[in-house]
Image (cartoon, helix red, strand yellow):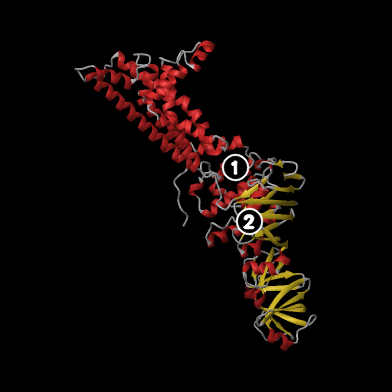
Amino acid sequence: MFNLTTIEIDAFYLTLKVAFFSVAICLPLGVITAFTLSRVNFPGKWLLDGLVHLPLVMPPVVVGYMLLLLLGRRGVLGSWLYDTFDITVAFTWKGAAIASAVMAFPLMVRAIRLSLDTMDRGLEVAARTLGASRTIVFLSITLPLSLPGILTGTILAFARSLGEFGATITFVSNIPGETQTIPLALYNFTQIPGDQTPAIRLLTISVVIAFAALIASDLLARKVKNRLGTKFEEDQ
Amino acid sequence: MISAEFVVERDDFFMDIKLEIPSTGATVLFGPSGSGKTTFINVLSGIIKPISGLIKVGNATFFDSENKINLPIEKRGIGYVFQDGRLFPHMSVEENLDFGRKRSHDKTSRKKEIIELLGLGQLLQRKPSTLSGGERQRTAIGRAILSGPSFLFMDEPLAALDFARKQEILPYIAILKKNLKIPIIYVSHQMEEVVRLADHLVLLENGKILNHGQIFDVINSPSLGTLLGKDDKTSLINCHVDKENGKDGLSKLVFPGGYFLVNQRNLAPLENVRIELKAQDVALALEKPVATSIANILGALVAKIETSKDTHCDVLLSVGNVSIWARITQQSASRLGLKIGSQVFALIKSAAIRPF
């Protein structure tokens, strides 16, 4: 059972790699976007808000196809990337990471924004009366206090990336060793009639990853909670 | 000195202010809720931007709508103690105290002194969530002071505390006022805090200043009476504790014009205290009573008689340089034949005198 096949090993590492880079793209952009939506007022804010949420409400296949049109070798951005930097994202694992990132982005932004919206903004004002500039306030007050939201967002985005299927298969296809993550490999196996063992083995791997991620996130969340001192004792 | 002239308009609230605040002692902003007290200090500290005006503190211009100057909050060098403390929950008490100190201009800070003064020594490693309400507010006060402010703003710092905690914090604020010489602007709607802390009093109602000035002048002004919905008269007198203190359990409080004997043991000799004396606790006599239980008998001159629509009248007495109000019935006043310039004796029970 534990002697994994090449396809399984490839799919396993690729899934983690894609999810990791997907989160790596999402996280900084998500924090900036969430902060902008929560704290800055500007005309056309609704447009940004809508744009961020699009992948959440559109069929993943549509998102994947839009990415292909945009970032494909002959796409608007894709051809420019290829001509200028010699970078191809369509039909590569990089493309898979981008597709996952786009799909996970709204989840990330929503979680962080919720944290920022519910945070006591009086604390930021207090920090400024103590002489801290906006940047210092962001780094020493806002960011640490929105850590629970950032953590939740990261876990959601990671989980979403582990399971990304529709946008990925449309944008970067199902190439073993390059873009074939566990869900895509599993899909492949289920298309072949007969022996179900390979599919069930992948299913098991998938469950193990999901559990490991959940446990890790729970440990982290506890740590953050302790740090923020959320155990309030009322003084009555 | 702060000179502030500004207009604020928000929703259905309109505020039009023109005021100068001295840079010594404590100025208390007093008024009912919704009168604009907090708005006032929020404008001074830069949290609220007025639609027009000119705000200067010392030589610095904080706000000038004509020349488009609006100094950011963090550049104004003020300390702000919020009603709800606003301690940073992810930092220990010491990290909270250091947050402003690190950024203050004078790093020759009095951290040790302040920690001792506010009794924070045992709390330094604790997280704010484990502190009592009083401890939180003490930390917040220390944090604001350690940022080295030129003015300290306090927005009802005791409002969220119960009576016992208030009594715990008030002496600390009084000590700060005495020891640190940082001018304080204190927002309150509690007379007790006014009587105890204020050197200057600003009365606010509906975004307008009703009256302002020295506490001794404003405390008995008709505008304060209207604000409180009663026409009590109170005398505030600054005294110091005599060095021969503690005879028979009574303290001797000396003021320019005489002394009071007070039922209070724990007053330190030579300490400055302020006493509050309600007009209805002062009785008058034409001759000095000989056999009486009343401990304080002061020779006085009648300076003013205010007759009320009721059955009483208020008599303003000069005792040395100090003014004391006495409330007696109109019938008594005419029986004694009181006129301006009459020589009388003010009789005050020691239990009626409340020293702070």
Q: Residue B216 appears at what percent x and percent y?
A: 72, 66
Within 10 Å of disc 2 (Cα), the crowding (few <14, some 14-19, many 20+) is many
Disc 1 packing (10 Å; few <14; some 14–19; many ≥20): many
> Between A108 and A7, which is closer to the camera in this rendering?
A108
- Give the number of the disc on residue A13: none
**Residue that badge 1 annotates:** A127
Looking at the rendered structure, the kind of residue marked 1 is Ala
Q: Report whether B66 appears left or right of A143.
A: right
Q: What amino acid does circle 2 point to?
A: Gly
Q: Quadrant of residue B306?
A: bottom right
Are the residues flagged by discs 2 and 1 from a single subunit?
A: no
The residue carrying mark 2 is: B36
Q: Quadrant of residue B195?
A: bottom right
Q: Chain of mark 2?
A: B
Q: Please name whichever residue, A236 or B303, is drawn nearer the observer in this view of the structure.
A: B303
Q: Is residue B191 above or below residue B320?
A: above
Q: Callout 1: residue from which chain? A: A
B304 shown above or below A183: below
Task: List x then y, in percent, for residue B332.
Answer: 69, 86
Total numbered labels: 2
Q: Report whether residue B176 is seen.
A: no
Q: Is residue A110 left or right of residue B3?
A: left
Q: Secondary structure at mark 1?
A: helix
Instruction: Tell me which residue sits at (63%, 52%) in the image.
Output: B39
Q: Calculate the distance from the C-alpha at mark 2 to the C-alpha at mark 1.
A: 23 Å
